[in-house]
Image (cartoon, rainbow, N blue to C red):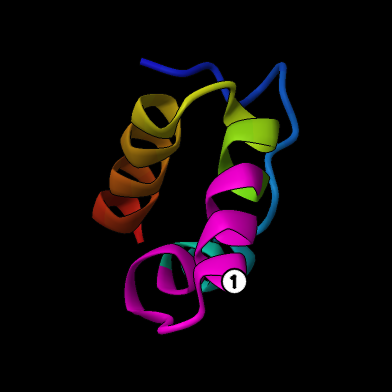
Amino acid sequence: MLDSAKVQYPPLPLLKTWVWMMIESDNPEIREKGKKNLIASFGSLAKANEYISQQLKSA
């Protein structure tokens, strides 16, 4: 489990936007930008997925 008390992650609406960019966009540059933003914030897509899933469950 990620310890969000120590690390400040971007707000959930921004994370959702990046996920949308990565999954839904028809533009390869936009898809890559969404992916890079998530990796830059979390270190990996797996950690980003874990954090987003955790936030959605507690919302």
Q: Position of residue 54 (x, y in %)?
A: 32, 41
Residue 27 included in the magenta stretch of the image: yes
Residue nearest the viewer, comparing 49 with 40? 40
Relative to residue 4, is residue 16 drawn left or right? left
Using a 10 Å C-alpha cutoff, classify the residue at mark 1 as few (fewer than 14 neighbours), some (14 to 19) or many (20 or more): some
> Residue 2 at x, y = what percent?
46, 18
The correct choice, above or below, for 38 with respect to 2 in the image is: below
Q: Specify start and end residues of the magenta stretch as a single range.
A: 20-36
Using residue 37 as the reference point, say whether residue 28 is left or right of it. Answer: left
Circle 1 is placed at which residue position?
30
Q: Is residue 44 left or right of residue 42?
A: left
Going by the numbered disc 1, the residue's amino acid type is Ile
| Mark count | 1
Q: Residue at x 63, y 44 (%)?
A: 36
For the C terminus, give its image quadrant.
Answer: bottom left
- Quarter of the image for residue 25 reads bottom left
Q: Is residue 5 above or below residue 31?
A: above
Residue 31's place in the image compared with 41, above or below, is below
